[in-house]
Image (cartoon, helix red, strand yellow):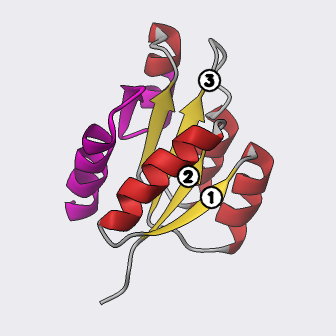
């Protein structure tokens, strides 16, 4: 059985550590990416099973990553993790195809979302 690969495209080192550790504890292979442009390059070149992208300000910075994923891999689940809830970014992300949008999720909430999506 193949180990699922999850791409983390996050702004904060702390989030990489917390979420990466939690995902690895469930057996996922985790790829870390601190740049949205590098994430787009990686998505174009490699196969991943799930993407988690951050939204750090009132502008939806993850938009380009989400749009490219939808173009290349429309069934690839993308979770947006926000520092603070922004209703406009929420609606934008969901309309573009994100599977969920969570505000500063606890690791257990993030894991629940990932596990639920991976079963689909």
| Viewer can see residue 75 | no
Residue at image location 66% in from the left, 36% down from the top: 11
In primary-sequence order, the first of circles 1 and 2 is 2
Residue at image location 33% in from the left, 73% down from the top: 27
* Coordinates of residue 60 in the picture (x, y in percent): 63, 23
* Coordinates of residue 54 in the picture (x, y in percent): 57, 35
**Residue interval drawn in magenta:** 92-120
List the residue tagged with mark 2: 8
In primary-sequence order, the first of circles 3 and 2 is 2
Residue 94 magenta-drawn? yes
How far apart are the two marked residues, 3 and 2, measured between alpha carbons? Answer: 14 Å
Residue 15, above or below 74 = above
Residue 116, above or below 59 = below
Q: Which mark is residue 56?
A: 3
Disc 2 is placed on an element classified as: strand
Q: Which mark is residue 83?
A: none
| Viewer can see residue 3 | yes
List the residue tagged with mark 1: 32
Residue at image location 76% in from the left, 61% down from the top: 41
Going by the image, does 97 lie left or right of 62?
left
Residue 48, above or below 96 = below
User: CB of mark 1 within 8 Å of CB of mark 2?
Assistant: yes
Disc 1 is placed on an element classified as: strand
Q: Main secondary structure of the magenta part?
A: helix
Residue at image location 29% in from the left, 49% down from the top: 111
In primary-sequence order, the first of circles 3 and 1 is 1
């Amino acid at each position: 059985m193949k180990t699922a690969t999850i791409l983390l495209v996050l702004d904060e080192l702390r989030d990489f550590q917390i979420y990466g550790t939690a995902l690895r504890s469930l057996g996922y292979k985790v790829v870390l990416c601190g740049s949205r442009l590098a994430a787009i390059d990686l998505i174009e070149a490699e196969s991943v099973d799930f993407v988690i992208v951050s939204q750090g300000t009132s502008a939806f910075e993850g938009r380009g990553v989400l749009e490219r994923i939808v173009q290349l891999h429309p069934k690839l689940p993308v979770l947006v993790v926000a520092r603070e809830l922004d209703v406009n970014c929420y609606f934008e992300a969901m309309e573009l195809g994100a599977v969920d949008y969570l505000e500063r999720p606890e690791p257990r909430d993030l894991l629940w979302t990932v596990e639920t999506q991976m079963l689909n």
